[in-house]
Image: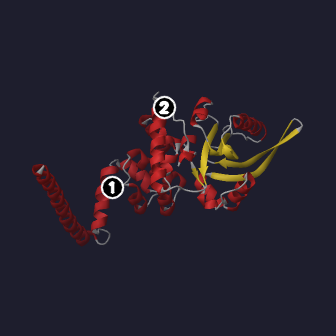
């Protein structure tokens, strides 16, 4: 036992000595660079530069990104552990022209973990991100999130669908930021006359990069399979009467207070023209939300690889 403790202590001291030597070397390098090139080479910046060179080794990619991203953008991204996560935030910040503050908020809000792209097998996710990088090709899996974080609406414990809709319209700017910067608001309670009946879609948006109308329905309780038929009707009507030349077919988003993932899988609503997502009007502790999102990613990837379904949503938080 004493020998093991001595070995462990020795390893700790070796790491400490290495760290101190790195600090000394970085201080020396910082001084030399400052003397030769001027300001901007503080020791912390030298560490950032080393890390940047490690994770962004492709000069062509750096040249493309640096046209729209500042050094402060890169500093927010380079310390993310997952390469796909770094690529996602870099490309989305470039395409949607996020400020550094917005980028920081997206990372803190775990946007990557809430998109479908994070739940795909690594190779498929990489291909989709490369298409975004090379051709600015935006896909629904990069656009839609689950869950949506709507804590900024300030809703009380008891509220109606009307209250939810009214709160979204009152905080439309922040809601659009949560949806994504390419969304434009078109209509509330969009009237659709079908036969001798009038139907009303809660909210209608347009997404510029997808070139699609986005129909959004708000539901307070758990997802019901009947919502699929209702949304299909709305999408067929929008496709027939509202879709313009050059646009892609409309796509639907059903926002529910709760959902059962097995229903979503059986109805094949995790792909195609209708998406279902939960929303949270009160945020759980960040650690708990992060753990749940990572578990959802693991289960979703396993599902794609044929290892059993994820049956639960986020309401277990």
* Residue linked to disc 1: 52
Closer to the camera, 171 or 89? Answer: 171
Where 113 sits versus 281, above or below?
above
Where 273 sits versus 112, above or below?
above
Residue drawn at 12 percent across, 55 percent down: 10
Quick one: label 2, few (<14), some, or many (20+) residues within 10 Å?
some
Residue drawn at 66 percent across, 38 percent down: 248
| Distance (Cα) linking label 1 and label 2 | 35 Å
Earlier sequence position, callout 1 versus callout 2: 1
Q: Quadrant of residue 45?
A: bottom left
- Residue 105 is at least partly visible in this image: yes
Q: Furthest residue to the front? A: 1
Secondary structure under the numbered disc 2 in the rendered image = helix
The mark found on residue 182 in the picture is: none
Point out residue 120 in the picture as x, y percentages from the top left corner: 47, 37
Does 109 sit left or right of 157 as displayed? Answer: left
* Colouring rule applied to residues: secondary structure
Closer to the camera, 264 or 203? Answer: 264
Residue drawn at 45 percent across, 56 percent down: 67
The mark found on residue 303 in the picture is: 2
Point out residue 252 in the picture as x, y percentages from the top left corner: 67, 41
- Residue 139 is at least partly visible in this image: no
């Amino acid at each position: 036992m004493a020998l093991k403790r001595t070995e462990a202590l020795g390893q700790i001291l070796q790491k400490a000595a290495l760290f101190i030597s790195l600090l000394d070397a970085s201080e020396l390098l910082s001084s030399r660079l400052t003397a030769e090139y001027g300001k901007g080479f503080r020791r912390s910046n030298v560490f950032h530069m080393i890390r940047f060179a490690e994770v962004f080794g492709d000069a062509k990619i750096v040249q493309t990104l640096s046209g729209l991203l500042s050094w402060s953008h890169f500093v927010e991204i380079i310390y993310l552990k997952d390469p796909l996560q770094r690529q996602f935030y870099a490309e989305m910040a470039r395409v949607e022209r996020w400020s550094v503050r917005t980028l920081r908020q997206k990372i803190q809000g775990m946007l990557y973990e809430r998109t479908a792209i994070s739940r795909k097998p690594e190779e498929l996710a990489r291909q989709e991100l490369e298409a975004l990088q090379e051709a600015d090709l935006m896909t629904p899996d990069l656009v839609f999130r689950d869950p949506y974080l709507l804590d900024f609406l300030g809703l009380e414990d008891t509220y109606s669908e009307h209250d939810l809709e009214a709160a979204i319209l009152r905080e439309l700017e922040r809601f659009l930021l949560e949806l994504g910067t390419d969304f434009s608001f078109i209509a509330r309670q969009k009237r659709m006359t079908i036969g001798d009946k009038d139907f009303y879609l809660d909210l209608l948006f347009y997404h510029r990069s997808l070139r699609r109308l986005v129909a959004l329905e708000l539901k307070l309780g758990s997802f019901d399979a009947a919502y699929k038929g209702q949304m299909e009707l709305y999408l067929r009507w929008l496709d027939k009467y509202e879709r313009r030349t050059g646009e892609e077919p409309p796509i639907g988003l059903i926002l529910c207070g709760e959902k059962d993932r097995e229903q979503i899988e059986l109805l094949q609503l995790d792909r195609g023209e209708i998406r279902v997502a939960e929303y949270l009007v009160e945020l759980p502790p960040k650690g708990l939300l992060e753990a749940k999102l990572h578990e959802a990613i693991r289960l979703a990837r396993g599902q794609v690889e044929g290892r059993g379904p994820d049956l639960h949503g986020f309401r277990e938080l």
